[in-house]
Each structure stands twice: as structure tokens, then as C-alpha cells.
């Protein structure tokens, strides 16, 4: 994309999950050997000339199956956190002004929370 910002797009047989973690490891290696007089930089040739292990497609598929659920859970948690922040920002002033009761607030929280989870 530019001198200090790169975008990677996986080939069909490699998942984004695999590329993300594989690239993370490569970047750690490249940072350790990076150079530059003003600031250390990683350039495209660093990627091009860095040896890497490319696993069999079947192994990548198995890896993706095992990690995909974690990414889904992270996204779900992020969405729930955002919803709870919005709910807090809406409810807190109403609670402080006495416009809503704790019981009414608890009902709103149950709506925003996971349907299968129980909260004591």
C-alpha cells in the first residue's frame, strides 16, 4: 500500500486466519533484523527474501477450522461489548435521574447479553 503499510491477501488455499498468524511471526523476525538510520523499517524486499515454511494445504485447512471459531467469538464479544457500552451510556443518566429503576435496567441488559448465558 505504501512504504510503511502493507496489505496481504491470501491465495485461495490459504485462509486469512493462517496468513494473519504466519505474518505476525515473520514480522517479529524481520523487526529483529530491521535496519535504518532514522527509524527501523521493513521493506518489501525483506518479505521477498525471508525464507518461510509453507505447510501443506490440508494442514492449513485444519488450522483454519481450529482457529475460525476463535475469531468468530472475538467478533461476537466485540459486538456485545459495543452494545453494552451503548446501553450503559443510555441507562446511566436515566438511573442517576431516577427515570428508570434497577429492575427495568436489568431487563434491558438481558436483551443486550447473550441469550444462552445466565447472569447471577
Image (cartoon, rainbow, N blue to C red):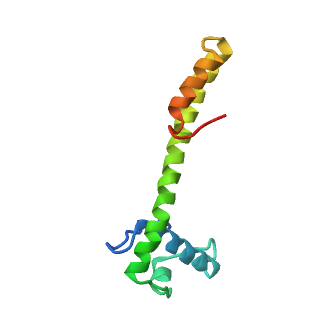
In the image, residue 74 lies at what x, y percent?
53, 53
Q: Is residue 60 left or right of residue 88?
A: left
Residue 56 visible, this orientation:
yes
Residue drawn at x 50%, y 85% is 50
Residue drawn at x 63%, y 72% is 38
Question: Which of the 4 quarters of the picture holds residue 92?
Answer: top right
Q: How many marks?
A: 0
Q: Please say if 62 is above or below 84.
A: below
Q: Please say if 6 is above or below 52.
A: above
In the image, residue 75 lies at what x, y percent?
49, 50
Question: Which of the 4 quarters of the picture holds residue 6?
Answer: bottom left
Image quarter hosting the N terminus: bottom left
Q: Is residue 12 left or right of residue 113?
A: left
**Of residues 21 and 50, which is closer to you in this image?**
21
Q: Please say if 47 is above or below 108.
A: below
Residue 7 visible, this orientation:
no
Residue drawn at x 50%, y 37% is 115
**Of residues 22 and 34, which is closer to you in this image?**
22
Image quarter hosting the C terminus: top right
Residue drawn at x 49%, y 76% is 43
**Of residues 41 and 33, which is closer to you in this image?**
33
In the image, residue 108 lies at what x, y percent?
54, 25
In the image, residue 78 lies at what x, y percent?
53, 46
Q: Is residue 15 left or right of residue 71?
A: left
Amino acid at each position: 500500500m505504501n512504504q510503511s503499510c502493507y496489505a496481504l491477501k491470501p491465495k485461495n488455499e490459504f485462509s486469512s486466519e493462517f496468513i494473519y498468524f504466519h505474518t505476525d511471526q515473520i514480522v517479529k523476525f524481520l523487526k529483529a533484523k530491521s535496519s535504518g538510520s532514522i527509524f527501523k523499517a521493513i521493506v518489501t524486499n525483506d518479505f521477498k527474501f525471508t525464507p518461510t515454511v509453507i505447510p501443506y494445504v490440508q494442514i492449513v485447512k485444519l488450522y483454519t477450522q481450529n482457529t475460525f471459531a476463535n475469531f468468530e467469538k472475538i467478533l461476537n464479544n466485540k459486538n456485545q461489548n459495543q452494545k453494552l457500552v451503548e446501553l450503559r451510556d443510555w441507562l446511566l443518566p436515566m438511573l442517576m435521574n431516577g427515570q428508570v429503576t434497577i429492575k427495568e435496567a436489568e431487563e434491558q441488559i438481558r436483551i443486550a447479553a447473550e441469550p444462552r448465558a445466565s447472569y447471577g
